[in-house]
Amino acid sequence: MWWSQVWLTIQHEFSDLGDAEDVTVIAVRLLVAAVLGGLLGYERETKGASAGFRTHMLVSVGSALFVLIPLQAGMEIQDLSRVLQGVTAGIGFLGAGAILKQREKNDIRGLTTAASVWMTSAIGVAAGMGREGTAVLSAVFGIVILAILRAPGKKQES
């Protein structure tokens, strides 16, 4: 019967999730990426930056997916460098959109936000590759840099 063929096709299309272990690994990696990206994004949002909570979460989860999917498909780790080059270039384009130069004065805004988007992407890549400990440690460094290390007397940069 054609309904059984349709059902088998649907099952085959979702077979990338495999067993409970595969689902757990994917869920943990994406959740870690989302939470860590959200932490950096929350800090940026509280400072009024153009890229905030949701943007950083999406960048981190997207970056995790870009490495998780090829690994799931069986790509060799040494071949992943091409994927990482594409992610890095794409995030550079996104970060460039956060940088603004004021016409009236020689003032450039958004460099810190662009750098935080770039770092959030790298954290997502680490989580997506199963390096959750490295991702967490990197996020701690990012939070310390963004929230604690501020130049005294300098106006807050968004």
Image (spheres, rainbow, N blue to C red):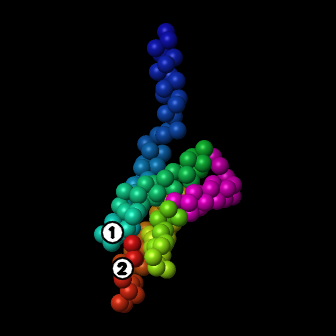
In front of the other: 53 or 76: 53
Q: Residues within 10 Å of mark 2 (few under 14, many from 20)?
A: few
Q: Secondary structure at mark 1?
A: loop
- Work out which residue is located at the far top of the displayed protein and give it: 1
**In the shown orientation, is residue 48 left or right of residue 103?**
left
In front of the other: 117 or 49: 49
Residue 131 x %, y %:
51, 63
Q: Secondary structure at mark 2?
A: loop
Residue at image coords 49%, 33%: 14
Q: Mark 1 highlights which residue?
A: 48
Kindly identify the amino acid type of the residue bearing the numbered disc 1.
Answer: Gly
Residue at image coords 49%, 39%: 18
Q: Which residues are magenta?
A: 74-94
Q: Is residue 18 above or below residue 143?
A: above
Q: Residue 64: which disc?
A: none
Res 113 → quadrant: bottom left
Q: Is residue 44 above or below residue 85?
A: below
- Work out which residue is located at the far bottom of the displayed protein and give it: 152
Q: Mark 2 highlights which residue?
A: 156
Residue at image coords 50%, 11%: 2
N-terminal label among 1 and 2: 1
Residue 75 x %, y %:
65, 49
Q: Are marks 1 and 2 in contact (CB under 8 Å)?
A: yes
Screen quadrant of the C terminus: bottom left
Q: CA distance from mark 1 to mark 2?
A: 9 Å
Whether the magenta-drawn stretch holds residue 78 is answered as: yes
- Work out which residue is located at the far left of the displayed protein and give it: 46
Q: Is residue 132 visible?
A: yes
